[in-house]
């Protein structure tokens, strides 16, 4: 059931923030997706924007790094430009910060650097229908309280394109900014420990944006919170924490991306609708390594992804959460993971069809007892551990594939024992349990029609 509350312009309701934008005329906004209308004839296109940023401090030039002393302020060029014009600054280095409050097309031609001297935010775009492209933005402050970033975007229908963003705490920060494009940017954070870096690309109450062809490295997370119907396409993320972290963000699409060497690939948290397809998620390792994570998420599709070399391929907690919804895994490849699919709820509702499981230490870990494994539906999957035959040659096994936990029940019930998961002692105990079971094994999965031959892949 969707969670929402009617709001009144200019009023804050606890965890809810009031959103009245030209793009979302008459929306009733809550934690979940927008629902309903304030009135069929309401015109909120000129409604004032709700201020949600903490005021950012002003720093004197003497407080900024000496490398920018003597540089021409880029703000002077912005102030001199006519609204709606194209600003092509001469090549060179300029001093920040910059605040733009009128529609402009700013094109640095790949030869312009704006440096804020390690204080505050480098560039603030507080207008609509503007373009910022082909600049290098660098040298923000390192204050999390004021969200020091390379570029803040606070308006709709803006394009942020082909920027080089480095030595900034946060990279690209969209707040209440919809129908925009973030394309072709190279983003990295400051050289801090992982947990105290800033986010590479952040969306907050920002809908219908296209995020494509970006390279995000050595940042903390990429997040979309309370942000709906965004598309993440052809991006690459490396050496960060969350490749993408969705929270209360519905109907987002993640397709054709590459996420490598991040702690977590894509995390769907309190999310309904949308999904991921044609992505490569690799080397999500470490104690919390996970390629795909679900927390109380519902109605998600996961199709044609390569999920490889990760500690956990899928980690699902209380998902699907909403009654009568499903999470659908189809045509994915789970290869060389510690645990390919880990389902830690007893709700069922996961449907796995035509997936490939090969080279995993454990294909499936189903938590709970009392027949929970049969609440999830398996059909037509390929398992390299299948021991049946295909006498009629139709490509499918003649007998079902049942996955049981024998000695593995030890580490499944006592998580610290997972350290010994592949030790010789547990391997021997598992062999003896399979040979002559002392205790009843636990059913982890039942596929009535497993594939006998490995299907061809189209992803990657």
Image: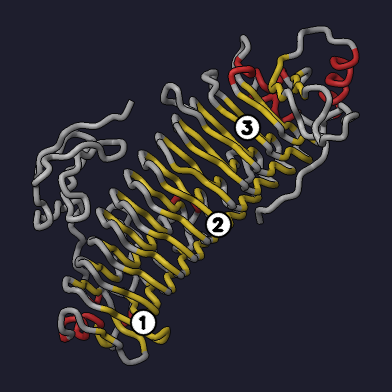
In the displayed structure, 123 sits above or below 357; it is below
Q: Position of residue 200 (x, y in %)?
A: 43, 59
In the displayed structure, 418 sits above or below 105; it is above
Q: Residue furthest bottom?
A: 90
Q: CA distance from mark 2 to mark 1?
A: 37 Å
Mark 2 Cα-neighbour bin, 10 Å: few <14, some 14–19, many ≥20 = many
**Residue 379 quadrant:** top right
Q: CA distance from mark 1 to mark 3?
A: 57 Å
In the displayed structure, 22 sits above or below 420; it is below
Which mark is on residue 352?
A: 3
Looking at the rendered image, the disc whose residue lies closer to the viewer, 3 or 2, is 3
Do the residues bearing badges 1 and 3 touch, measured as CB atoms within 8 Å? no
Q: Residue at x 31, y 50 (%)?
A: 204
Secondary structure under tag 1 reads helix
Q: Residue at x 15, y 53 (%)?
A: 51
Q: Residue at x 30, y 87 (%)?
A: 88
Q: Is tag 3's residue or tag 2's residue first in the polypeptide sequence?
A: 2
Q: Is tag 1's residue or tag 3's residue first in the polypeptide sequence?
A: 1
Q: Nearer the viewer, residue 438 or 35?
A: 35
Looking at the rendered image, the disc whose residue lies closer to the viewer, 2 or 1, is 2
Secondary structure under tag 3 reads strand
- Quadrant location, the N terminus: top left
Mark 1 Cα-neighbour bin, 10 Å: few <14, some 14–19, many ≥20 = few
Q: Position of residue 222 (x, y in %)?
A: 44, 53
Q: Nearer the viewer, residue 342 or 230?
A: 230
Q: Is residue 103 left or right of residue 47?
A: right
Which mark is on residue 257?
A: 2
Secondary structure under tag 2 reads loop
The residue singled out by tag 1 in the image is 67
């Amino acid at each position: 059931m969707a969670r929402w509350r009617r709001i009144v312009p200019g009023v804050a309701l606890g965890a809810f923030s009031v959103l009245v934008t030209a793009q979302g005329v008459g929306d009733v906004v809550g934690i979940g997706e927008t629902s309903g209308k304030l009135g069929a004839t309401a015109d909120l296109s000129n409604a004032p924007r709700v201020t949600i940023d903490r005021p950012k401090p002003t720093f004197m030039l003497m407080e900024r790094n000496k490398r920018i002393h003597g540089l021409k302020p880029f703000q002077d060029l912005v102030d001199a430009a006519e609204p709606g014009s194209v600003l092509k600054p001469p090549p060179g280095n300029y001093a920040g910060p910059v605040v733009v409050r009128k529609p402009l097309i700013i094109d640095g031609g790949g030869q312009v650097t704006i440096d804020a001297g390690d204080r505050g935010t480098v560039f603030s775009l507080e207008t609509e229908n503007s373009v910022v492209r082909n600049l290098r933005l660098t040298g923000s402050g390192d204050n999390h309280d004021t969200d020091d970033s390379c570029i803040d975007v606070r308006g709709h229908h803006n394009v942020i394109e082909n920027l080089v963003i480095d030595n900034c705490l946060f990279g690209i920060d969209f707040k209440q900014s919809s129908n925009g494009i973030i394309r072709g940017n190279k983003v990295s954070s400051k050289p801090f420990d992982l947990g105290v870096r800033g986010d590479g690309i952040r969306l907050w109450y920002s809908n219908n944006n296209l995020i494509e062809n970006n390279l995000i490295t050595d940042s903390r997370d990429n997040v979309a919170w309370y942000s709906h119907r965004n598309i993440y396409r052809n991006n690459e993320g490396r050496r960060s924490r969350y490749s993408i972290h969705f929270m209360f963000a519905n109907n987002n699409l993640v397709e054709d991306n590459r996420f490598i060497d991040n702690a977590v690939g894509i995390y769907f948290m309190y999310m309904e609708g949308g999904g991921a397809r044609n992505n490569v998620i690799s080397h999500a390792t470490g104690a919390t390594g996970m390629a795909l994570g679900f927390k109380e998420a519902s109605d998600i599709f996961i199709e044609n992804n390569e999920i490889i070399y990760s500690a956990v391929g899928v980690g699902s907690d209380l998902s699907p959460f909403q009654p009568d919804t499903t999470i659908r895994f189809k045509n994915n490849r789970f290869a060389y993971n510690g645990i390919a699919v880990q389902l830690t709820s007893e709700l069922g509702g996961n449907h796995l069809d035509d997936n490939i499981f090969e080279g995993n230490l454990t294909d499936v870990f189903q938590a709970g007892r009392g027949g929970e494994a049969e609440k999830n539906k398996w059909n037509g999957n390929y398992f390299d551990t299948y021991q049946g035959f295909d006498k009629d040659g139709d490509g499918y096994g003649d007998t079902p594939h049942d996955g049981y936990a024998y000695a593995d029940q030890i580490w499944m019930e006592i998580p610290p024992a997972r350290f010994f998961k592949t030790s010789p002692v547990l391997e021997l105990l598992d062999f003896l349990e399979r040979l002559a079971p002392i205790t009843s094994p636990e059913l982890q999965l039942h596929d009535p029609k497993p594939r006998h031959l490995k299907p061809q892949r189209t992803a990657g």
